[in-house]
Amino acid sequence: MNNRIRVTGLIAAGLLVAALTAPTAPTAPAAHAGERGHPSGPGHPGKHPGGQPGKQAVAVGHGGAVSTVDADATAAGLEVLRRGGNATDAAVAAAAALGVTEPYSAGIGGGGYFVHYDAPTGRVGTIDGRETAPAAFARDSFVDPATGEPYPFSPERVTSGVAVGVPGTAATWERALDRWGSISLRAALEPGTRLAQRGFVVDETFRSQTLDNAERFAAFTSTSEQFLPDGDAPAVGTRFRQRDLAATYRLLARRGADALYTGALAEDVVDAVTDPPTTAETDLPVPPGAMTTEDLADYRTVDRKPTRIRYRGYDVYGMAPSSSGGTTVGEALNILEQSDPSAMGEADVLHHYLEASALAFADRGAYVGDPAYVDVPTAELLSDRFAAERACLIDPDTAQPKPVPPGDVTDVDGACGDTGEARSWEDNGLSTTHLTTADRWGNVVSYTLTIEQTGGSGIVVPGRGFLLNNELTDFSATWSAEDPNSPEAGKRPRSSMAPTILLQHGRPFLALGSPGGSTIITTVLQMLVNRIDLDMPIDAALAAPRASQRNTAAVTSEPAFIDAWEDTLAVYGHTLVPAGDAFTSAAEIGAATAIEFGRGGKLTAVAEPERRGGGAAGVVQPRRHHW
Ligand code: GLU
């Protein structure tokens, strides 16, 4: 009980800290690339006196680029590029560094989706490294045997062993390096191992994320030892070391990804899932999972064909199911392509964006799940005829009542229409992390990875230094034959991750992505609308305030979006409500990253100026002059 009171106090303190320091979303588009000064100078992150790299939101130059949410991770990717590594090498190195500095969003306890443009062949390839339900996971695993009702989302499903999927990230790194990399996993893990061993300097974001999670972290012996040393979140400005994680990375360096999927580490993962290391004092329920060492040994990534659509002269490549990112972003763009933004004002463009997004989300809910279990009609969802059927439901002056029903993919005849029951599937989240890399040879990576919730399941594998995911919370809570995302043994829960690469005339134009649960889809979509339809420079397209319409009655919006658009969009019938949920103190949507490709090899790497404390963009050779 004492423990609980102390932790509640910590949370209150954390909220206060966060309120005092909360990043505010920008109210106006940011300056154009290159117009913003920075103490580190243009192009590379530089160093701050405390030893951690400085950070900037925009970097312009040549020879390769990296953009992540974190200065240390961007520095890790740039280090690999400077030593002659390629975009895949840099992406894996940056991701491994994020596993250290952003351990609540990403790491080897989670999964993700890796999208790659291969300059020599001009092909886009993808790796599905999504977590997978264990073989003993049942259709009713989220149903409490005591009540016959689904466990409440929080705390039971969120902080549990039962929601832990078999992790895919270490296998993704190995597969990506095998397919496209030029260095070993050992070499790619080096910068991350160093960061874990020597420590990184704690910033406000890390401290406030720790405090947001303090109650559930305190429920586990391993997690509280690691992230709440002396009963408090590490102080801002102190160096935070993770020696267990460094040792785990060294083990992976020696034995390859197999070290996670077989042997003693696999056994430790299984123990943590099936018998979570709860403290004697906690009163959190923490339902255990049923993962086995066979589940880990059987885990495989999947090489998938990307989704592809044409949008106003660009080829847009995205992640195919098991993520709904590629189909939903693609369908919404196809719907939007039926209208002409040059004939509209900005409010009309935003109205169409919100309406197209709601329609695409209705179809996502009805049709998209793990293709190993569900016959996903990807071609129909991405067809222009289907888009025409959906687009004609948009009234240019008036928002449709939400939720809207899905379309009928079994009868795509181009006639205006919808069918079936209107349902909304809202899920939130600010966790996850997206990184974007490019190399001097023209290869590009867009990679989104996650452990689901900020802090995942809350369970650190004892002695191993990393958090396990709670990705199976992305399934629906109960099974139904109509729901493509029903829980099932061996299945991958439907994701919203949307790592995206755009080509123009066969050459890279833009690579981008975002965290944020199902708002990932709307963030990627809105950034593309900003860049292509509203002709904003890429840094402004990324920084502009966001709104997310996921087929719900009201539009989840950042405060700055509400300030700017509430009255105008009310005329169409849109109601805007502030973003934010019970798990986080930030009212922001999606800390995104992007790289845009210009003429003559010019690279513009862009990260957030403010969201999640600001990200870090860097290039190998910063430009010396204005273009
Ligand atoms: N689990 C989410 C997904 O795969 C990502 C989690 C988040 O971004 O909060 O779509």
Image (spheres, rainbow, N blue to C red):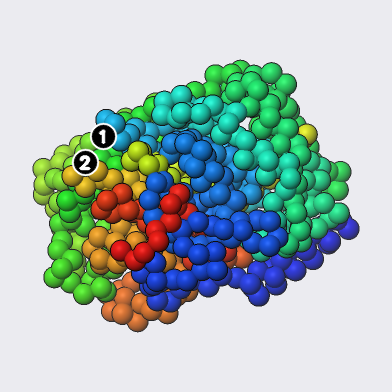
Identify the residue shown where x is 72% and y is 21%. 264
Q: Position of residue 415 (x, y in %)?
A: 11, 49
Front position in the image: 482 or 209: 209
Q: Is residue 267 above or below residue 604?
A: above
Q: Mark 2 or 1 closer to N-term?
A: 1
Contact between labelled residues 1 and 2, with CB atoms less than 8 Å apart: yes
Residue type at mark 1: give it.
Gly
Taking the image as drawn, is residue 229 in sight?
yes
Q: Can you tell which mark lies on residue 122?
A: 1
Front position in the image: 556 or 398: 556
**Left/right of residue 146 with respect to residue 573 in the rendered view:** right
Question: Most extreme residue toward the front, as rendered?
Answer: 624
Q: Position of residue 470 (x, y in %)?
A: 60, 41
Q: Position of residue 378 (x, y in %)?
A: 27, 36
Identify the residue shown where x is 31% and y is 80%. 568
Identify the residue shown where x is 79% and y is 66%. 9
The residue wearing badge 2 is 506
Q: Position of residue 444 (x, y in %)?
A: 37, 41
Identify the residue shown where x is 44% and y is 61%. 58
Residue type at mark 2: give it.
Gly
**Left/right of residue 312 with respect to residue 93 in the rendered view:** left
* Secondary structure type for disc 2: loop
Spatial distance from mark 2 to mark 1, Cα to Cα? Answer: 7 Å
Please identify the quadrant where the C terminus is shown: bottom left
Front position in the image: 163 or 171: 171
Q: Residues within 10 Å of mark 1 (few under 14, many from 20)?
A: some
Taking the image as drawn, is residue 520 in sight?
no
Q: Is residue 187 above or below residue 152?
A: above
**Left/right of residue 582 with respect to residue 389 in the rendered view:** right
Question: Most extreme residue toward the right, as rendered?
Answer: 2
Q: Determine whether the beta carbon of the residue marked 2 sits less than 8 angstroms from the nearest atom of ligand 1.
A: no
* Secondary structure type for disc 1: loop
